Image: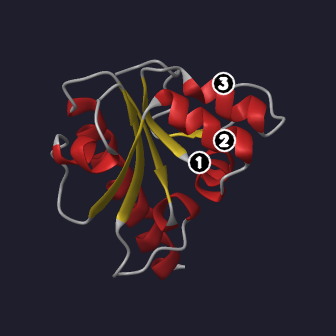
Amino acid sequence: MEVLEERRRLRERVISEARSWARSLPFRATAILVGSYARGDFNKWSDVDVILVSDLRGSPLERLSRVDHPPGYEVIPLTPSEFLALLRRGNPLAVEAAEVGVVLRDDFGLLGTLSRSRGRPGGTLERSSGEPSGGG
């Protein structure tokens, strides 16, 4: 039981740090934690995977170069239209965001879109702080 409690605390700490990072971004963004920390099956080699939806322009590499992120973060930069197109096509990463994603910040109001895409009532995705979407 002690090991499980330690894993829970570590996951909560990573989510809290990711939420702080997402809230510090100086532009409008929706940030969703995906991957092993969102699912809870992380290990000591896991990185922190974040889908970052923003209005930043340019190629994905150009967008990523404009985002200051902590070491160990894998940031996937998307525009709102790119993200919604992936979700409509059933892209595995977008589906994962809808099913197990932890919303860190939601300036674009995608929480409702994600919930509807999975046939759930709005607000059923895990929120990192229990706050309503749209905070930031």
Residue 89 seen: yes
Disc 2: which residue: 87
**In this rendering, is residue 54 above or below 50?**
above
> In the rendered structure, which amino acid carries the disc numbered 1?
Ala
Q: Dot 3, how many residues are within 10 Å of its Cα: few (below 14), some (14-19), or many (20+)?
A: some
Disc 3: which residue: 112
> In the rendered structure, which amino acid carries the disc numbered 3?
Gly
* Circle number at residue 97: 1
**Residue 134 or residue 9, whichever sits in front:** 134
Circle 2 or circle 3, nearest the eye: 2
Residue 123 seen: no
Inter-mark Cα distance, 1 to 3: 12 Å
Direction from residue 127 to residue 123 in the image, left or right: right
Circle 1 or circle 2, nearest the eye: 2
- Dividing the image into 4 quarters, which one contains the N terminus? bottom right
Residue 89's x, y, as percent? Answer: 72, 45
Dot 2 or dot 3, earlier in sequence: 2
Q: Residue at x 49, y 28 (%)?
A: 80
Please, what secondary structure does the residue beneath circle 1 have? Answer: helix
Inter-mark Cα distance, 1 to 2: 9 Å
Residue 120's x, y, as percent? Answer: 81, 34
